[in-house]
Image (tube, coloured by chain):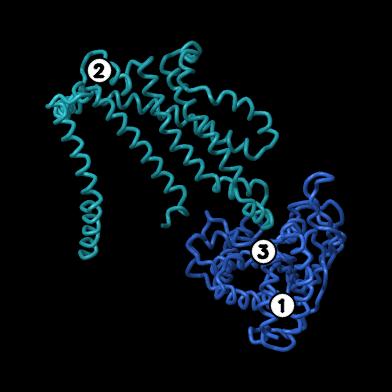
Chain colours: A blue, B cyan
Amino acid sequence: MAEATNAPRRAEVTVEGLTKRYGYHPFWHEVLADCSFTLRDGELTVLIGPSGCGKSTLINLLAGYDKPDQGRILLNGAPVAGPGSDRLVVFQETALFPWMTTYGNVAYGPRVARNVPKERVDERVQALLEKVGLQDFKAKYPSQLSGGMQRRGELARMMINDPAVTILDEPFRGLDAMTRELMQEYFVTILEERSQTVLFVTSEIDEAIFLADRLLIMSNRPGAILKEMEIKLPRPRNKDMLQTEEYLGYKREALEVLHAEAIKAFAGGSKSAQDFLEAFHKEHVEQA
Amino acid sequence: MSTGANAALNKLRKKIFNRTVLRGTVSVCLCLALWELGRAFKLPLLEAMPAPSEIFGVIWKLVVDPKFWANWGASYQRVLVGFLAAQVVGIPLGLAMATSKAFYDISFSAFEIVRPIPPLAWVPISIIFWPTTESSIAFVIFLGAFFTVVINVLGGARNIDARFTRAAISLGSRPSDVFFKIVLPATLPSIFTGMAVGMGITWEVVVAAEMIAGKSGLGYLTWSSYVGGNYPQIVVGMMSIGIAGYLSSYAIRLLGRVCMPWLRIF
């Protein structure tokens, strides 16, 4: 589990007709409606959607914290039943345990797995802390770390468990613009190196295209996948690519879908849709 | 080495002789002076109060009297027994109510009906029920802290951020890991809040119980001073209770800092 085997693992997640409602019939709230997609093995899939579109609900279902009303989730063909250490969620902001030091947080997975000798755990924790540049902060508590350090700590805690599927739920939310950009570059390096199945959820279009092998665009509530795009920017990625024609083409294509979706939501009185539309017009009308 | 010792000494000096401490001292002295003068000039209200000078006279007599310290010891012993029993029973009960829905459903209603009964209302029934006065006082003290402890632990353990338990499960925790490594440390701050509040109630209860049924203790000392007409000693008794309560709360804060190092960093 915590000890990665050298044999290549396959991890493909298939989501079929996922529907989730809250509340009771006729007053229920449909959060996800017939949502279907696939996370391909070894690919970094990015899910983007307006805020409040059901992304977090989808993550809870994928992780097994919650059960769908209809539809199913298959991991390598087998239905997912409840949470498991094969799928790991990195939560919004940070979910490092405040009562454990950075070291304790990173060592948590192998310690509860109880199948790795102590020295081996220590070796792996030290190596990972060095990799994410936190070796000098291993005795500090999460509240003593900066936002960027906390995200790197999360990354180390994830990597030591080496889950078959990693789900990142808006991990950079709450970071300032500078740190956010640094973290994007940092994460892309690490995730490219790992080349495991990853679902990255965000509401930022630049971040989405920069990271993605494949982009899934989600509709407003009730959430479903509106469009799938292959992002064929070369790897390793760097921020200079954000200036290329190819990148701008992807962005335009994605924004058109998001724009149409925002208009629909705006008609329904959504504040966030209004914000999006204002930003969209500013960018595109000024550019034209 | 010596420069380090010097620096430490300077730091200590700054800690003791600074403006905040000076103002505090001035405020206390001013109060004492007003009180003394109020008594001398027979101001209304202060007239009946023994003056600070009289009280200091009694204090000197009392601090060398082993009987006075026996009263401290008696109250402390009762507080400690009742308080510890409340922790030993209350913390597991609160945690069980927070983690098991079935247990919560069964126990909470009964708990909530008994909880509003003030501890002192239990005095008659516990005197009847328990064989000795001492055990009935301990029981009333126990009740005083018990409900506060349970409510705090329950509230704390139920309000743990779901991201922590979920992250722990995804990282491969067994249920016992979730309990001991997540729920318990996440509840510790609430446990200590419960302890601090419970300790306050414990001192209230012990004093009242000693006044009603005691043959020793600081509450008994205060009440018997009134009965015996030794008014300065009443004030000494009251001050002793205040200091004893403060020392107890201080001990709990100290223990909290040791047990929760992650809250100690600022």
Q: Is residue A224 left or right of residue A179?
A: right
Cα gap from disc 2 to disc 1, whole angstroms: 82 Å
Image coordinates for residue A51, horizontal then vertical, percent:
70, 63
The image quarter containing residue B156 is top right
The image quarter containing residue A94 is bottom right
User: Given the image, on which type of amino acid does mark 3 rest?
Assistant: Asn
Residue drawn at x 78%, y 76% is A256
The image quarter containing residue A169 is bottom right
Image coordinates for residue A98, horizontal then vertical, percent:
53, 56
Q: Which element carries disc 3, helix, strand or loop?
A: helix
Does B171 appear above or below B58? Answer: below
Return the chain for callout 1: A
| Co-location on one chain, circles 2 and 1 | no
The residue at which mark 3 appears reads as A161
Q: Circle 1: is it few (<14), some (14-19), or many (20+) Cα within 10 Å?
A: many
Is residue A3 visible in the rendered image? The answer is: no
Image coordinates for residue A58, horizontal then vertical, percent:
76, 59
B2, B25: nearer the viewer: B25
Cα gap from disc 3 to disc 2, whole angstroms: 68 Å
| Co-location on one chain, circles 3 and 2 | no
**Residue B225 marker:** 2
